[in-house]
Amino acid sequence: MTQDARVIVALDFDNVEQANQLVEQLEPSACKLKVGKEMFTLFGPEFVKSLINKGFDVFLDLKFHDIPNTVAKACKAAAEMGVWMVNVHASGGAEMMRKAKQAIESSSHPQTKLIAVTVLTSMDQDQLNDVVPGVTPAEQVAKLAALTADSGLDGVVCSAKEAVMLRKSLPESFLLVTPGIRPAGADVGDQKRVMTPVDAIEAGVSYLVMGRPITQADDPLATLARVNESIQ
Ligand SMILES: O=c1ccn([C@@H]2O[C@H](COP(=O)(O)O)[C@@H](O)[C@H]2O)c(=O)[nH]1
């Protein structure tokens, strides 16, 4: 069992009973939890607070992207719910990120971590070309991660494939939070830039985000235990 759990289980359910059935089996020492757009839209702050009250560190993955004033207020509201971590899109720019960080620091829960999404792990070179022509995913991640660090945030969401590159230029304390984690042979689904748990940890990531490989497994608890054991 890890002291600071390195696996963040993505609770992507449309049914709160099903989500709670899984949560009841989990221990805060074995994983953190992530609530994203689907569950937050359906079940709101009460669901998030119920997880915090059970002792879990909760990553509220709402990926805010709007004008600085709006994002700052949303981040402050998230922090005041007591979440461990919240995020924005780095492409919202430096002013948006700085104001969001300041808003969290002025909240009643200033320890909430703020990280920024660089390039979604579901995007490969072809998809990135449609929105930012002429750069590779790695180049775009490097640029947005540098902007995020300069803006005073705690880390980024990126693919584990970019971790070795980012660790060369960013401090060890800068968090690399990586979705697109798949045990060898697992279905990748819509993820494009994927890596196994062991390879990701060896590459220097801080936290592994895993949804379907755990939540859709025949035995989610055993799957999580295997992942934790493999990354000890
Ligand atoms: O770049 C990103 C940012 C966020 N996500 C989120 O992580 C999980 C991944 O779930 P899997 O089932 O393990 O694919 C999901 O909640 C995404 O919204 C991401 O995948 N990539």
Image (cartoon, rainbow, N blue to C red):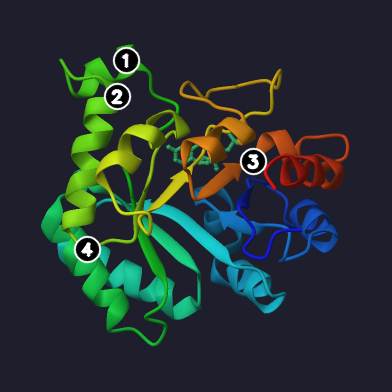
On the picture, is 3 further left or further right than 1? left
Q: Marks 1 and 3, how far apart in space?
A: 23 Å
Number of marks: 4
Q: Are marks 2 and 3 in contact (CB under 8 Å)?
A: no
Vertical position of residue 165 compared to residue 184: above or below = below
Residue 230 at x, y percent in the picture: 73, 39
- Label 3 Cα neighbours within 10 Å, binned few <14 / some 14-19 / many ≥20: many
Vertical position of residue 60 compared to residue 226: above or below = below
Q: Earlier in the sequence, mark 4 or mark 3?
A: 4
Q: Earlier in the sequence, mark 2 or mark 4?
A: 2
Residue at the spot x=42%, y=72% of the render? 112
| Secondary structure under the numbered disc 1 in the rendered image | helix
What amino acid is at disc 3?
Gly
Q: Marks 4 and 1, how far apart in space?
A: 28 Å
The N terminus: image quadrant: bottom right
- Label 4 Cα neighbours within 10 Å, binned few <14 / some 14-19 / many ≥20: some
What amino acid is at disc 2?
Pro
Q: Which mark is residue 211?
A: 3
